[in-house]
Image: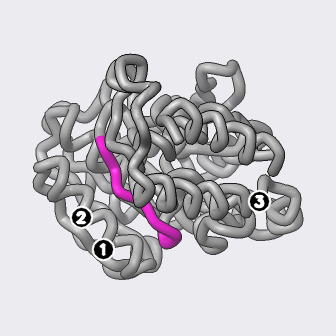
Amino acid sequence: MTLRGILTEGERRLASAGVPEAKLNAWYLFAHCFFITKSQFFLRADEEAQESDCGHYRELLEKRSQRIPLEHLTGETEFMGLPFFVNENVLIPRQDTECLVEEVLKFCDGADVLDLCTGSGCIGISLAKLGHCKSVMLSDISAEALEMAKKNAENNEVKVQIVESDLFQSIQGRFDLVVSNPPYIRSGEIPKLMPEVCEYEPLRALDGSGDGLLFYRSIIQQIGSFLKNDGKVFFEIGADQGEAVSQLMEQAGFRNVEVKQDLAGLDRIVCGQYSK
């Protein structure tokens, strides 16, 4: 079978399985298995494909048809233009979160930064790579997630401190900036999410309790002991949580609390400044 033929087979197979963006997914798996770029494919489309590569491709197509995330099959994704390894122990970085990083980058010059609930490390590592931070600490309750964060820090050649901690339990020091994308999905909403999310991504990185606000409450209640005077906190939020999280911050004494939108115009970030 030609390269063109096996790619067409993949597109049809994923489409028949109801996989979203079937053609694009088929291409990414194809490029991963055949080590080929778009321009190379156009030149070589009518070449015969290696049977071993075809076998590997069909195996991944079967797994993707079962709605295993594309990124789990390739083992990597891109975030802020940087490469990140991912697996079943971490949330897959999403484009919405890039808006959070871009906002924090405005303030991180010379700053001590804490990335709380870091997961893959995509937020803190991007800040360390693209900003001019004085220091960056990555923290998570999951040792498995921190293994991935460490691997990603090394791959992106950034120096960060990694701390296993249940929120602030094992954190020491004070920070100019604390940034967090905590679990914020309401427990009852999780079964309604796409299979790729609810069946394959880590539940404790998703579940924010009945109202989705458990981690915001916990972080906001404790954060005063870990922020420098006039320090800032930045949260990613669900699109309908801006008012609730803003109120929690204002009640805790934060000032200049703002809700900011993502590229789709949906509420995505709440930030504020802490004063003793």
Q: Which residue is mark 1?
A: 147
Q: Nearer the viewer, residue 131 or 111?
A: 131
Mark number, residue 195: 3
User: Which amino acid lies under the numbered mark 1 shown in the image of this protein?
Assistant: Glu
* Residue 60 image label: none
Q: Are marks 2 and 3 in contact (CB under 8 Å)?
A: no
Mark 2–mark 1 contact, CB under 8 Å? yes
Q: Looking at the image, can residue 103 be seen?
A: no
State the image coordinates of residue 265 (x, y, percent, origin top left).
69, 19
Element marked by disc 3:
helix
In terms of sequence position, does the residue under pointer 1 or pointer 3 come before the other?
1
Q: Percent x, y for residue 40?
A: 33, 24
Residue in the picture at 53% in, 42% down: 1
Q: Nearer the viewer, residue 190 or 111?
A: 190
* Residue displayed at 35% across by 29% down: 37
**Percent of width and height locating residue 25:** 60, 40
Label 2 sits on residue:
151
140 shown above or below 134? below
- Tell me how far mark 2 sits from mark 3, CA to CA: 27 Å
Element type at mark 2: helix
Q: Amino acid at mark 2?
A: Lys
Seen from the viewer's position, the closer of residues 9 and 61 is 9
Residue 87 colored magenta?
A: yes
Task: Please tell me in which quadrant of the rendered image residue 140 appears.
Answer: bottom left
Give the magenta range: 83-89
**Crowd band around label 1 with a 10 angstrom C-alpha radius: few (<14), some (14–19), many (20+):** some
The residue located at (58%, 57%) in the rendering is 58
